[in-house]
Image: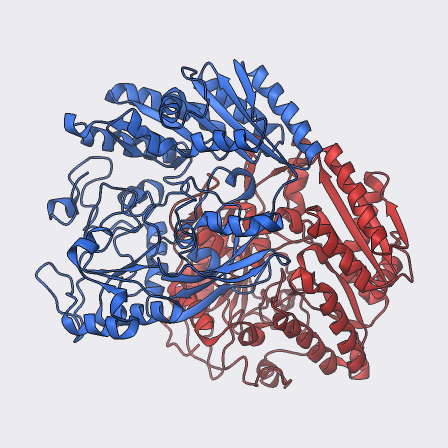
Chain colours: A blue, B red
């Protein structure tokens, strides 16, 4: 915040505007007194998201009830030069919803209405605070569901899914949030309201809808979201295949995809991940096996059957030691409960862990796993692997013990894994976003001109840098250190951010 | 062009910069003398694209050979303040490639190299001048193909497909260009080169790749395009079902989709379209039937078979009078040849015609067809319908005779049909783009704030308005008249554009 601010804010010695009494009253007048939180104890709830390594208490939390109130809140921020960040359930894993110093959190927790529900046209219009799972729950009686299914779907909100372009286990077949959101009502960083996308499958003009989805809060706040609902498949088959090595499991994935089968999901868990899941959920994965694949097939009954036979044949050729099939919906739910609890379950086998999220081309999956194993050995830290294998979307979990002073080493290992993904022709992030966590790694993946293009785009909508600043794009202030070499984070040195 | 220009151009009384000898020499030095066309006869070839109603001879045509030459050409344009437009095969139907007054055409006809071809990872990197069909031809020996298939695929280029986010008959199942292009190398309007997207299915940061695709030449020029290749399906079934009314055919489409079947293609032709196709190709459609559906199913053999039986049952319930099935690849090719020749075939039954391209929600398809029939009757002009029914993407062809003075009436009718699509909750354009043709209708679909957001975005990359100006977004100069009321086009009154 280098910028001189208006009569509602003043520059403090930390360089950010302060929210003074006049601005606080203006927020209260616009949203009602109960929609403005400033009690230090209440504010503490908002200090971090699922990436718990970064913590920062906001100056104020606002709880608007509708688009008009969001627009009023953002307009006041724009006028006063106060930075803001939108927040859903706070389950994000890249620090995207971490508050901005001296800034405002716009919590969308009160915006949970379903505005339209049209099973015939297979779409619904919801507010951003509606949870992902709630949409599918509503649609189920009509034989419909909402496809993207992040592991946190029971609590995470559709607004957060839009910000992060969230994926999930079934994205290998059905695509990401961007493929299932038709239209958005958005409050831009200057407080104006626009509609992006449309009711028809294709619309006219540049695809601002697609641009907004995955922009991690840097282009404004979505306040109404039109999602499409898919017809739920006639048949579903879920199997778990054990393998004596991770490489064989990886090769089986490659062969399944190469055969032209598009499974609804292909997940892989290694021995450590299985150990943690079993300790937490007891879903029935085989303890001690080197790797397990969860393969789900869906579609017409006959199609499922044929693909099931093909997948079994591939697993056998690749040396599977055991294949088990979920006999009914209850057993299938258990398999998924185990898989989806994997991150949280790490607490059972390690005091601390970092979740990584990188992508490699599917053909280089086995190579990536080998390199992770080498890096893990070299650094003397365990790495559990549980991931969307069909997409090449890795989620290595770096296990460590803060009390034993392993944090820095673990952080370095986790970052090295992400950058190795880029080296292999992949991406820094598959579905968790860049946020605060990986902004400084962006130059590993993009050239200066590429980053300048992103910056230009951002400035077009947010010239003063108020909408979730410091996220996604690297800044000299944020990323003083040369890439790859670990130094304490500048925000940490400045005491703005506390360590894990 | 209000802007004062540098030493290479000068402002003329028409308000645009002139390309003087110094600038022409600079182009020749950068690209070689044979890459700069200025012979009036040669220039005439570039005066229009598939929308033949707008014609404008460019000042110069450049023929770069690679990314570096495109960057050099664009840099010189940027420096001199000269507008430019990229051009592929010139088959676009919305005037997107119509030259800009006093401007440069950057023809990509020489950039036809296949830079990488990787059947294992199922992708290829090509230059923009490679034709759509050429990609599938290369991929075929590996059992792969490129999915989007515009009717013009034998001649249209992948660069043009990227600019327009082109679709085609099979997009109802497989999606549009944006779903099949992983990455792009792009020369921005200031001459800098960036890479958008990446090799992995998902990438980090805002989706500039998705934004660029469909931006109709307003954000720069794509010079390298990484497309993904799909495995060609095991089985294909193609049937043609005749119906006594268009409404029944429309209802059959609705019922097929509602049953959860996702056909590879669902096309509809009405009596007039069939008459024209048969006159041109003789593919064997039933002359005199009110409507025919072409339904193609693909996938595993068994899946195809089951879906085929289901589709036949739906057609029977909706009162089909005849169903014929393509017995082999040759017959299937003939069915498609008839369908894809439909636009060109109109010449057989009408001296002149306009192609419209609007989208309606699929559930309102029958209603839209009824309204087109009423409008056609009220205006006393025939309208042939041939379209992507599964997507709700209409292509009404308004038939008229210029010599009988029907042009204005036809133009009005065509525009009314597009705007009726917006009224029904659809879109002005499905796959042909906005271009020059529909820029003035954009306010029918978007509010002022929405258009301002698009303008802001465009300005971020092209502050001086040099990259295909006057297209997509309405400008007061372009759209002086109140919407809906026909007046001669200002460019026409000024003698810049000639009429049909």
For the question of whether residue B184 can be seen, the reply is: no
Viewer-closest of B242 and A169: A169
Q: Is residue A27 left or right of residue A266?
A: left
Q: Is residue A239 left or right of residue B147?
A: left
x 78%, y 79%: residue: B402
The foreground one among B69 and B148 is: B148
Is B73 located above or below residue A9 in the figure? above
Expressed as whole percent of the image width and height from the top left, the position of residue B390 reads 70, 55
In-front residue for pair A242/A144: A144
Please tell me which residue is depicted at 27% across the width and 31% down the height of the picture: A353
Residue A230 placed where, x, y %?
59, 48
What is the count of numbered marks? Answer: 0
Q: Nearer the viewer, residue A284 or A495?
A: A284
Residue A326 screen position, x and y as percent: 56, 26
Q: Which residue is found at the position 68% from the left and 70% from the top?
A: B52
Give the farthest residue toward the left: A13
- Judge whether residue A359 can be spotted in this image: yes
Q: Where is residue B453 shown, x and y percent of the image?
A: 42, 68
Toward which corner of the image does residue A407 lie, by quadrant? top left
* Residue A378 position (above or below residue B160): above
Q: Answer with left or right where residue A458 lies relative to residue B232.
A: left
Q: Can you say which quadrant of the picture contains the N terminus of chain A?
A: bottom left
In what quadrant of the picture does the C terminus of chain A appear? top left
Query: Residue B137's quadrant in the figure?
Result: top right
Q: Is residue A396 left or right of residue A207?
A: left
């Amino acid at each position: 915040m280098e910028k001189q601010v208006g009569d509602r804010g003043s520059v403090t010695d930390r360089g950010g505007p302060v929210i003074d009494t006049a601005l606080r009253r203006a927020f209260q007048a616009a949203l009602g007194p109960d929609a403005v939180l400033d009690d230090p104890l209440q504010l503490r709830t908002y200090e971090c998201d699922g990436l718990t390594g970064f913590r920062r208490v906001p100056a104020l939390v606002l709880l608007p009830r509708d688009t008009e109130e969001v627009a009023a809140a953002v307009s006041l921020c724009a006028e006063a030069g106060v930075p803001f960040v939108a927040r859903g359930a706070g389950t994000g894993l890249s620090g995207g919803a971490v508050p901005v110093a001296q800034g405002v959190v716009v919590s969308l927790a009160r915006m949970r209405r379903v505005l339209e529900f049209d099973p015939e046209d297979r779409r619904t219009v919801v507010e951003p605070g509606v949870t992902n799972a709630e949409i599918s729950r509503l649609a189920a009686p009509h034989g419909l569901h909402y496809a993207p299914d992040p592991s946190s779907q029971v609590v995470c909100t559709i607004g957060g899914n839009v910000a992060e372009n969230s994926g999930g286990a079934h994205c290998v077949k059905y695509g990401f949030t961007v493929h299932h959101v038709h239209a958005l009502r958005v409050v831009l960083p200057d407080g104006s309201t626009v509609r992006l996308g449309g009711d028809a499958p294709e619309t006219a003009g540049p695809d601002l809808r697609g641009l907004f989805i995955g922009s991690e809060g840097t282009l404004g706040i979505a306040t109404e979201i039109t999602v499409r609902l898919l017809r739920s498949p006639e048949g579903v088959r879920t199997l778990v295949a054990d393998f004596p090595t991770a490489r064989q499991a990886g090769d089986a994935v490659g062969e399944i995809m190469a055969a032209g089968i598009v499974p609804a999901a292909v997940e892989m868990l290694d021995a450590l991940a299985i150990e943690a899941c079993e300790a937490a959920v007891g879903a029935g994965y085989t303890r001690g096996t080197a790797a397990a694949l969860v393969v789900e097939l869906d579609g017409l009954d006959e199609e499922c059957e044929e693909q099931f036979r093909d997948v079994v044949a591939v697993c056998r050729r690749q040396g599977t030691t055991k294949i088990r099939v979920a006999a009914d919906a209850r057993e299938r739910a258990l398999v998924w409960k185990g898989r989806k609890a994997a991150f949280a379950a790490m607490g059972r086998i390690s005091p601390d862990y970092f979740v990584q999220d990188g992508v490699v081309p599917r053909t280089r999956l086995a190579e990536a796993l080998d390199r992770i194993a080498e890096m893990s050995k070299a650094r003397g830290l365990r790495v559990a692997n549980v991931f969307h294998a069909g997409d090449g979307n890795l989620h290595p979990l770096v296990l460590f013990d803060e009390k034993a002073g392993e944090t820095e080493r673990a952080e370095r290992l986790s970052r090295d894994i992400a950058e190795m993904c880029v080296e292999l022709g992949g991406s820094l992030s598959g579905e968790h976003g860049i946020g605060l966590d990986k902004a400084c790694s962006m130059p590993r993946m993009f050239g200066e001109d590429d980053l300048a293009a992103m910056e230009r785009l951002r400035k077009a909508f947010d010239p003063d840098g108020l909408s979730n600043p410091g996220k996604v794009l690297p800044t000299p202030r944020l990323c003083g250190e040369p890439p790859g070499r670990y130094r304490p984070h500048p925000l940490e040195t400045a005491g703005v951010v506390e360590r894990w």
